[in-house]
Amino acid sequence: MIDQNKIFSIKTEAEFNALALQVFGFQFENNPVYRSFCDLLYKNPSDIKTIEEIPFLPIQFFKSHHVISSSKNIKKTFTSSGTTGSITSKHHITDLSIYEESFKKGFHSFYGDIKDYVVLALLPSYLEREGSSLIYMVDSLIKASNHKYSGFYLNNLHEISTTLKRLDKQGKKVLLVGVSFALLDLVEAYSFNLNNTIVMETGGMKGRRKGLIREELHNLLKSGFGVNTIHSEYGMTELLSQAYSKGHGVFNCPNWMRILTRETEDALTLTAPGKTGGLNVIDLANINSCSFIATQDLGRVSKDKSFEIIGRFDTSDIRGCNLMVL
């Protein structure tokens, strides 16, 4: 068994690499689905010496298989959004404390103490369905902020507009986190000139709007809210960690998460930094499911390990995971 305290106390690249290899060995032995996938590729822990050699499970397996590395009872199942009748991903969670520690420590590493913020959430499409890991995270952050005006604002744009302006004018540090189409609805209905607010979009037009590239979306939001930068969150049902961008679409990961890129025509070959490819995610917080996932996102990773989202593979379904398709 892997000590989860080691996951969230990683300080160096060497510590990350060593623990990732340990997690790979653990999941190879304890995750039947992942073991079968590795066996098909003739990959065994005894042959794997670097994280680049670890097999990445295609994210579609979370739709078709029970991806789990624990014998404990399932406490909660997070599900992806999807069109009516479509098959959704299911992430079975046996230990919610790991998810909570991941998003709390992850947020703190980028933004500091959540108690310093008033958290206003505009996430109607997520609130309207069951099983959203984003709602679980934001609800926890709202409660931890312990401010009377922190909360979810479903479709009441007038109320959130009034609250947002009042709090910002009072000099309160505000985190406005919202799905892209709802933030656009807000700035089209009301004008703002915010000085103390972080505007964070979580992606997801969900067919409500025409497709916008990130720069186009962020320019509209910057103008509408009167802010210099738009922040972003990159996460998904199949992950228990989030990456954050503080502007310009450049994301950074917490110490227990890494992004690699793979060739678009050869899923088993990684690309060099700076080259566009499919995104592979190592999320060590996924200790009880699978920490090595090949996503359907396209992006670029820089030498400093920051990354950008370029779009999605053409065959992938439409989902709300902070995706702007070029």
Image: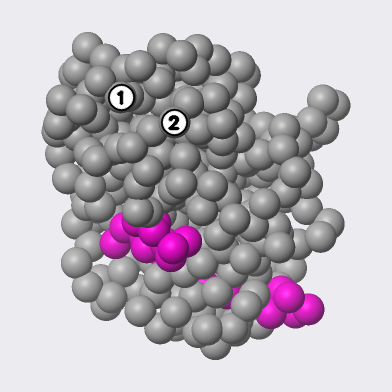
Residue 125, image quadrant? top right
Residue at 73% across, 75% down = 264
Q: Where is residue 106 in the image (x, y as percent from the top left)?
A: 29, 48
Q: What SS does tag 2 mark?
A: loop
Residue 62, image quadrant? top right
Q: Where is residue 49 in the image (x, y as percent from the top left)?
A: 44, 83
Residue at 82% across, 25% down = 84
Q: Is residue 64 above or below residue 164?
A: below
Residue 45 appears in the picture as rendered: no
Front residue of 271/192: it is: 192
Amino acid at pointer 2: Ser
Q: Residue tagged by mark 1?
A: 165
Front residue of 196/119: it is: 196
Front residue of 236/75: it is: 236
Q: Is residue 80 left or right of residue 99?
A: right
Amino acid at pointer 1: Lys
Q: How many marks?
A: 2
Residue 255 appears in the picture as rendered: yes
For marks 2 and 1, the one nearer the N-term is 1
Q: Give the range drawn in magenta.
A: 245-268
Q: What SS does tag 1 mark?
A: helix
Q: Where is residue 305 in the image (x, y as percent from the top left)?
A: 39, 74
Q: Distance between the residues labelled 2 and 1?
A: 10 Å
Q: Which mark is residue 191?
A: 2
Q: In this view, does 33 lie above or below 274?
A: above
- The dominant secondary structure in magenta is loop
Q: How crowded is mark 2: few (under 14 residues within 10 Å), some or many (20 or more)?
A: some
Residue at 59% across, 83% down = 275
Q: Which mark is residue 197?
A: none
Q: Position of residue 114 (x, y in %)?
A: 20, 34
Residue at 78% across, 53% down = 316
